Amino acid sequence: MPGTKRSNISKGTRVKVVQKQDQRSNQLTEGVVLKILTNSQTHPHGIKVMLEDGIVGRVKEVL
């Protein structure tokens, strides 16, 4: 499931995100959503979230 819709993501959802410094290499980091940081319902590059371990990134895949 793509991470461009806010309705697909909630606290506790397992996701893969791309961090700002990894955008060029598109390296994904897996984790569990702690907070949703994007207010709009959709975002073309992915909804920005904070994972439980403090990593901030845009959701590329919802697991």
Image (tube, rainbow, N blue to C red):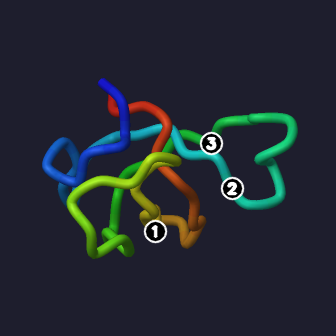
Give the x, y percent position of residue 45: 52, 48
Quarter of the image where one finds residue 19: bottom right
* Residue at image coords 19%, 42%: 8
* Residue at image coords 37%, 40%: 3
Quadrant, the C terminus = top left
Badge 1 vs badge 3, beta-carbon distance below 8 Å: no
- Front-lying residue, 53 or 4: 4
Badge 2 vs badge 3, beta-carbon distance below 8 Å: yes
SS under mark 3: strand
Q: Measure the C-alpha gap from mark 2 to mark 1.
A: 10 Å
Q: Measure the C-alpha gap from mark 1 to mark 3.
A: 12 Å
- Mark positioned earlier in the residue sequence (2 or 3): 2
Give the x, y percent position of residue 48: 45, 63
Q: Residues within 10 Å of mark 1 (few under 14, many from 20)?
A: many
Badge 1 amino acid: Met
Which residue is labeled 3 in the image?
29
Side of 36 where 61 appears, left or right: right
Which residue is labeled 2 in the image?
19
SS under mark 1: strand
Which residue is labeled 1 in the image?
50
Q: Residues within 10 Å of mark 3 (few under 14, many from 20)?
A: some
Q: Measure the C-alpha gap from mark 2 to mark 3.
A: 8 Å
Quadrant, the N terminus = top left
SS under mark 2: loop
